[in-house]
Image (tube, helix red, strand yellow):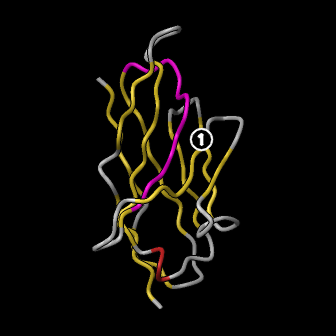
């Protein structure tokens, strides 16, 4: 069983920064891919960015301001958010594609979500 626990959300003023963490626990061989999504009130969930270890891709709305990284030793992925804007206010969700053991199929897991509120 794999569990993801997100942390780091909160209230920040426009122009500020936050770093979200997503820690995976359980029987994990390696994280193949990580991604972050967000969902603002009344809007559909949207992809913020992905990181497969070799390549990073981001939504145009966050490109140049957000970055996804990971610590493989800790099985933790991060979303660094800089120059935050009020329109970045949303619940942020991490998702990881995990290989449970060498050569196994991969499984996707989701975090519980963490609220980010950016005040103007």
Direction from residue 97 to residue 45 in the image, left or right = left
Front position in the image: 39 or 25: 39
Classify 10 Å Cα crowding around label 1: few (below 14), some (14-19), many (20 and above).
many
Front position in the image: 39 or 101: 39
Extreme residue in the top direction = 103
Is the magenta region chiefly helix, strand or loop? strand
Direction from residue 7 to residue 120 in the image, left or right = right
Q: Is residue 117 above or below residue 26?
A: below
Which residue lies at the image location 38% right of the left edge and 30% below the top edge?
A: 25
Residue position for label 1:
70
Which residue lies at the image location 52% right of the left edge and 8% below the top edge?
A: 103
Q: Position of residue 86 (x, y in %)?
A: 47, 83
Specify the quadrant of the image occupied by residue 16: bottom right
Which residue lies at the image location 70% right of the left edge and 66% below the top edge?
A: 64
Specify the quadrant of the image occupied by residue 118: bottom left
Say if the magenta span includes residue 93.
Answer: no
Disc 1, SS:
strand
* Magenta region, residue range: 27-38
Quadrant where the N terminus sits is top left
Q: Is residue 79 above or below residue 56?
A: below
Which residue lies at the image location 50% right of the left edge and 39% below the top edge?
A: 76
Q: Is residue 15 above or below residue 91?
A: below
Specify the quadrant of the image occupied by residue 79: bottom right
Count of numbered circles in the view: 1
Q: Position of residue 93 (x, y in %)?
A: 39, 53
Extreme residue in the front direction = 44
Q: Position of residue 45 (x, y in %)?
A: 37, 59
Say if the magenta span includes residue 30.
Answer: yes
Q: Position of residue 19 (x, y in %)?
A: 53, 60
């Amino acid at each position: 069983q794999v569990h993801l626990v997100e942390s780091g959300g909160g209230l920040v003023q426009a122009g500020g920064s936050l770093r979200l963490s997503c820690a995976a626990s359980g029987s994990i061989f390696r994280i193949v891919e990580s991604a972050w999504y967000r969902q603002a009130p009344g809007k559909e969930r949207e992809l913020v960015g992905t990181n497969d270890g070799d390549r990073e891709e981001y939504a145009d709305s966050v490109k140049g301001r957000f970055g996804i990284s990971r610590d493989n030793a800790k099985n933790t992925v991060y979303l660094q958010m800089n120059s935050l804007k009020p329109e970045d206010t949303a619940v942020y969700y991490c998702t990881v594609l995990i290989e449970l053991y060498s050569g196994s199929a991969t499984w996707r897991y989701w975090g519980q979500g963490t609220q980010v509120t950016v005040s103007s």
